[in-house]
Image (spheres, grey):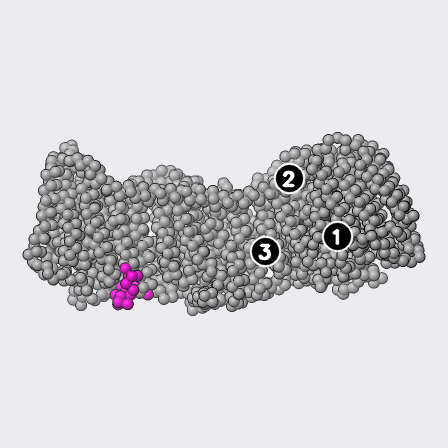
Amino acid sequence: MNDLRTLLPEILVATAATAVLFADLPLRTPVQRRLLLWLSLGGVFLALWATLSEAASTAAFDGMIIRDGLTRVFRVLVLGVAAVGLVLSRDYLVRTGLERGEYYALLLFSAVGAQLLAASRNLLLTFLALELLSVPLYVLAAFARHHRSSQEAGLKYFLLGSFASGVFLYGMALVYGQAGTLDLARLGGEDGLLLRLGAGLLLVGLAYKAAVVPFHAWAPDVYEGSPMPAAAYMSVIAKVGAIAALARLIPLALPGLVDLWRPFVAVLSAMTMVVGNLGALWQRNLKRMLAYSSIAHAGYLLMGLAAGTATGLVASAYYLAAYALMQLGAFGVLVLLERMGLEADEVQDLGGLGDRSPALAAAFVLFMASLVGIPPTAGFVGKFYLFTAALEAGLGWLALVGVATSVVSVAYYLRAAYAAYADEGRPGVRVVGGWWAGAGVAVAALGVLLGGVVGGPVIRWVHIAAGVIP
Amino acid sequence: MMLSALVLLPILGSVVVMLLPRREELLRAVASITFLLTLALAAWLFWAFPPEERGFRWVERVPWIPALGASYQLGVDGISLLLVLLTAFLFPVALLGTWDAVRQRVKEYLSLLLLLEGAILGTFLALDLVLFYVFWEAVLIPMYFLIGLWGGERRRYAAVKFFLFTMAGSVLMLLGIIVLYLRTGTFDVLRLLQTPLPPQDQRWLFWAFTAAFAIKVPLFPLHTWLPDAHVEAPTAGSVILAGLLLKMGAYGLLRYGLGLFPQAAREAASLLSLLAVVGILYGGAVAFAQQDIKKLVAYSSISHLGFVVLGTFVFTLQGMHGALLQMVNHGLSTGGLFLLVGVLYERAHTRQMDAFGGVAKVMPTFAALSLFIVFSSAALPGTNGFVGEFLVLLGTFRADVRLAALAAGGVILSAVYLLWMAQRVYFGPRRVDPDRFTPLTWKEATALVALILVILWIGLYPKPLLERSEAALSLLSARLHAAGEVVR
Amino acid sequence: MESVLFVVAAALSLAGGVGVVAARAPVHSALSLLVVLVSLAVLYLTLLAEFVAVLQVIVYAGAILVLFLFVIMLLHAHNPDLRPSPGPGRLHGAVAIASGGALVALVAFAVLRELGRGTAEVPVAAGFGTAPAIGRELLTTFVLPFELAGVLLLVGMVAGIVLGKAPERRVSERTEARREEVLLTRGRR
Amino acid sequence: MEWVVVGIVALPLAGAVTNGLVGGRLSARAVSWVGCLVVLGAFGLGILGIRDLSAASPQTALRAVLWEWIVSGDFRVAWELQLDRLAAVMVLVVTGVGFLIHVYSVGYMRGEEAISRYFTYLNLFVASMLLLVLGGNLLVLFVGWELVGLCSYLLIGFWFEREPAAAAGRKAFVTNRIGDAAFLLGLCLLFVIFQTLDFEAIRERLPQAPPGALTVAALLLFAGATGKSAQLPLYVWLPDAMEGPTPVSALIHAATMVTAGVYLVARLWPLYLASGVLPVVAAVGASTALFAATVAVGQTDLKRVLAYSTISQIGYMFLGLGAGSAVAGMFHLTAHAFFKALLFLSAGSVMHAMHDLIDMRRLGGLGRAMPFTAASFLVGALSLSGIPPFVGFFSKEHILAAARAHSLVALWGVGVLTAGITALYITRAAVLTFAGPPADPARHPHEAPPVMRWPMGVLLVLSAVGGFLGAKALGAPFDRFLAAAFEPEVKPSPESEAFGELVLGLASVGAALAGIAVGWLAYRGRRMPELGALGQALSRQWYVEDLYQAVLVRPARALARFCAQTVDLHWIDGAANGLAAMVGALGTGVRRWQTGYVRQYAALFLVGTVLAVAYWLVR
Amino acid sequence: MTVPPSAYVLLSILLFVLGGLGVLLRRTALIVFMSIELMLNSVNLAFLSFARMHGDLSGQLVVFFVLVIAAVEVVVGLAMLIALFRTHRAVDVDEMDLLRG
């Protein structure tokens, strides 16, 4: 029973997902169908409550699962992302005729997977959680299944995802071959070529999920093709999950190989920042731009991990939260627009937003500023913290790459923000609004602003995650 | 509380303006009142600041992000006091002088201006490096949009260029700030000023900070963002940009470059002061070759700011005093010049000097006021510019005669290009259309007269400004000389 | 005995693998895959994994492969590999083969260095790899993954339902057509 | 008595402010009254001051400290004014001649639209000049120094709609700025040497000063003086300055402002004595005197002749100073103020009559129609030529005597030669303008109105008899009044004899007479002898202006354009834009890798995996 | 046991890379899927050989779960393929090139 209580948040969310699946069948009228969202949100908020109400650290299921600071922080993150992801989706789905219970259920299932990644201390469980995170995302990507681009997105995601799963599995096998166990806690003292090889493959597998260069190529295509809210959600949740897994895996399993994995992660981080920001530079499609931006941000997130210190981990976690808010917010603004019944996903479509909806335009500017890392936004505080971590760990060059690429990113983020005010409104584009999505954007905007102005308490709370660093 | 009020008042005004309905008169009234209240508050601070104060007054401190060691700490000393006053003065003048220039999106325009004022004041008042950086960067977004939305034809290019240049420098400063924190364990400027750093740390930290400041100033050869930004910005934007944003860089050099890294500053002084002199001459020469009035004024800024940097890096009291005063002067004079260009542009819709000629005939009052400002910029004795330039020259002379000799060339050049401009625009046969060159509106006239009165005040009786900053600068100068001993 | 079995099964599985990858028609690939699956099952037996071997035959050969064949029948599409590809060029193939070879070499190097030719015979408990042993483990130590696997299967099911359902034209054809037009024009720029 | 000192400056300033602010709404008559009366008032105050001073000991000065001005550490400068004997002389010259010219202007500028602006500038000029004169320290003096430059700029460009006028004003200011830059550096150096800029304090601390630095400082200040006083090599602005209204030329560019350099050297006399740069001063003065005199011969524009004459005569003044006699310099300054103002006013009268025609080739025979003007010009010319008993004879003789006394024979020779040439060109001008048959019989020039005539009359009298102020026979009251201010004056060498004095003095008079004779013979009857290449060289100032254009102005412009167009746009900005373009190209590169083919993505993945694995194995 | 575990592992990596090459080189989606199955199978072989080597049962249990995942992936992949085929008659992965850049 106690074992199950440690898993209460996951169980609650999974239950909500199942409930939504069943509730989808009898609910017909639009009013009734509102229940689907309420159910999903209910599950998420109950899980949130369950997460926050349990403070003590404990292990369960023969040590496969641990509930500690890291788990709690990432659970809250995942649940928050899920909640915002849900509210952003609802209006869009209804508008495009895609609203089906499966959507919510899949979204929630993948949230379960992401939560488990943070809690797992066993490679097998990590692998399963990774699949539980990913498979629903493949489906979500292809959810607009009559659209060729959505199908293409789903298939590409799926194909490369399976490929990555294979690599991850092979890494698992090699690690197992060396150590004879899959328990992360027992891998600690091991060393050997197979372990190293396996660790490398494991990292590659997780890097894929986080869209780290050179394993990133799927991301732009998939995000562009996916339905807008799905892209928003997956661009965040996959990263949350992958970072959680890395945060669990690296310090626990590879304490003896610090000299190996730190430069490795640092180089990945640098490459990711560079390629992500360069790729975004010329994008006219906002989804694609945000996809590259999400790649770039994977690089920034890795920076904290590369530092390998408590500061680094906390910085990454905080930046992850900031990233979640700004990325979801930016996508959320787009969800509220449409062009001739389609998604308004091009930079031009933002034209005239400043006049049509000043609040929305202002929010968009805020998100862009935060993505660049301009104060006073959460993005700034996060980057500040990350650079602190990197410099503290002696990774000055990485911090330099980080700031240089941030400067490059100014070009494209601001172009988008600028378009919202300076460009002519494009014919056929309109603000469709939506209460739910609007609320989601508002929450994100508030979070981004507060995270920048009074980030203190949040950071202090995130510090509990640092317990995993020895 | 005083200082928080000073910073928050405009920001609050900005929010209020944003929330008000789109009624132009109402919006303008709210903005004007906010500006004037801020000015009143700043004036009171100036008046109440005791001249013998060496350190910071009205310091307030609230923990902000304890995990990062950052706190919300404000304070004002003799150095920042002048710039605060300048800021509070220049905004209402800029608004008044360009009252009719902006007709579109007045609400956003006013809101951004107010936000900008708050951020700039914050930059000058912050006594915590993180807070400083926050304000420093927060200035970018409103300025970006001011240029980008209300600017000229190439506004997009200019706005992005401005942003990229500035950001490129400031991120280096960000890294510097962090490393400083890692070395000393604090962002608190008050404590950092008391904490001597080992010279080898200072060296590259100094350059990291200086990168940001030098771009903002701008120091030759990092200046090329400035002409574009100035030319494309709307008049009020140019006034603020020249009058205040550049001062942020100069202020940074003085407060942080010199204050935190005295030894490194001494080592770098010869290079930086040389660049400053090159900037003085180069900016003047290039200004002379311009056809566009606004560009001419923009390059003149480079030249004038060269004096500021020069005065800063000769480390004599007079040099720094002159540099500080020259910051204020440049804000007034060049701000005034941009207002003039704005007045002309409003009427002619061009800034090419060829299109003008004989303006003095059709707008005699305006021409008279213009000449006042032109000569203030050319540092004619009796105006503010002379006091500043002379102090810089004197300070430089005491440190390095050769530099002073070269810098004196700038005195000549400023007369060359400014009078050249005056001749082509105001004098000569009348080429402009008298129907379009309507007389000054009373708002424009008031703005210019206000500027001129301050120009004369500082020119004739700069003592209130000088004496309030003397103690703080002497302290700084003494520390720099002590640092010099250590180096030797 | 075992080595003979190993050599035969390994050869078969490799041949099958090559068949899967190189076959022209998907049906041939599927049949080659069957060869691989079965020969692997044999190898599993030599590795004292009888339960897994059985599962391999039932689940893989019995279910998954049938599903493949079923879809092959359903689609009976032309073979695109015979047409000239608009996609990656010659360099792509070279890079693929080179890096595949490199991977093999690297792993082989590691394996040989680490394990050598050693045959450290580990004594195993009776019933190692049998159904009861596995089952016990599944419901004790591995109960959580087991449950998770259940959830995953549910997700798979949902996925099948969502994606495989017959097209319902709720989205108007017009919208779809326009969307594609937009994408195509953009894609060719 | 402080209020006298303050009042001398404040009165004209008040006039300027009044005319500047409300002059536009007053009648031309009211404006003129205000303009003239304030200067007259200042003159009156000057008389009051000089009365006090003559009663007191020679070193006495009336001082007024207004308020602290620039305060920075050990650098403290206040707005302070001081009236001593030297200043008093200048005050009287400035306000006296100034007042006359103000009155003259009332007539000359009648009908001018912007009369209030004119008197504003003129009053402002007088105020600035008085500030310069009365400045109690070098910095206040410098303020006046620059402000008179400003007024000069404004007044030269008074008719700013005429392109040449506007350009000339600018040229004047800029050229002056070159000198002023040196001046500023000199100020800095002086402060470094003395820790003060106060005249009194400098005098006191002079003995302790290092001589080398002193020399440099004196040279720097003298460079400033060459600018303001239009000496070689910075004289070029003065001829162009004739674009301004003629009264302005008379006041600013003949009588007062341009002599500020002389005043500066006199003001810092102890410094110059100690610094050892007096020979330089003398050499520059003598060469300028000769140079400008020759150029004046080649001019056809009457005012330009007078302008070069002014340059030349100021050269004389510097020669006097350089020869060690500040009194001689100051006396020539005063005398020159009289006769040159008279000459200019006469020329103005001609212009007034001929509707601004000033080309001597088209003038002639005006003596008949304008006898008073002709007489005035004649007196001025004789005085300028140094013919006794006119004032110029005494002042010039004083200078030459000083040069002789100090065995500066070469300089003395130059002085005599110049005297001859001076007589030649002024005779030429007088003959061409007033003698012979009228160039254009159709014109009927008329004499100037009384309001213009009587200031000329006063100056005529002063030019004619003012020389007795310096006549030794009458005890040289001017010398006595000033001499004490210049302690220790360089004493003339004792061996100079009365007889020798007389003979040598006659040399210059002889040269002058010769010049007059040549001038009369050569130009009588409106003839213009061809001088060929020499004439060309003279009319083009020995190609100095061309040289400056070729060596300084045009290269500077080209350099500026090169900096603006090539260095700034292509090199510096090009580097920045190039960097941006490079980043942009990399961005395109990244996009090109994103082919859309999933197999290629997998290949990238695999390559990445291999690299990662290799890293993990090999490290 | 006379065959060393390294032999099994070598076989497995060969099969793994074969599968990988299938993904990289083939355009028929179905064959690509099968190649992925091949990769998963090779992983299973590795696990089993290591389980035997260590005498540890958990390796075998992993294989059980890999089988489950393989099934799920096949379902998802084939469902997507069918959806694509239904609307666009396409089974060629190279035809999925709308999204790029």
* Residue A390 location (% of width, % of height): 63, 58
**Above or below, D243 relative to D441:** below
Name the kind of residue labelled 1 in the image. Answer: Leu
Instruction: Report the side of A399 relative to D90 (left or right).
Output: right
Chain letter for the residue marked with disc 2 in the picture: D
Residue shown at 7%/54% (left/top)? D502
Mark nearest the camera among 1 and 3 is 1
Mark 3: secondary structure: loop
Q: Is residue D199 magenta?
A: yes
Chain letter for the residue marked with disc 1 in the picture: A
| Near-viewer residue (B458 or B469) | B469
Q: Is residue C30 magenta?
A: no
Mark 2: secondary structure: helix
**Above or below, D513 relative to D205:** above
Q: Are marks 2 and 1 on the same chain?
A: no
| Magenta residues, start to end | D195-215
Chain letter for the residue marked with disc 3 in the picture: A
| Near-viewer residue (C15 or B267) | C15
Image disc number at residue D592: 2
Mark 1: secondary structure: helix
Task: State the separation of the CA atoms marked 1 and 3.
Answer: 43 Å
Name the kind of residue labelled 3 in the image. Answer: Pro
Residue shown at 8%/56% (left/top)? D500
Q: Quadrant of the N terminus of chain A?
A: bottom right
Residue shown at 24%/50% (left/top)? D231
Mark nearest the camera among 2 and 1 is 1
Which residue in the protein does label 1 denote?
Answer: A197
Magenta segment main secondary structure:
helix
Which residue in the protein does label 3 denote?
Answer: A376
Instruction: Report the side of D485 relative to C163 (left or right).
Output: left
Q: Quadrant of the C terminus of chain A?
A: bottom right
Name the kind of residue labelled 2 in the image. Answer: Arg
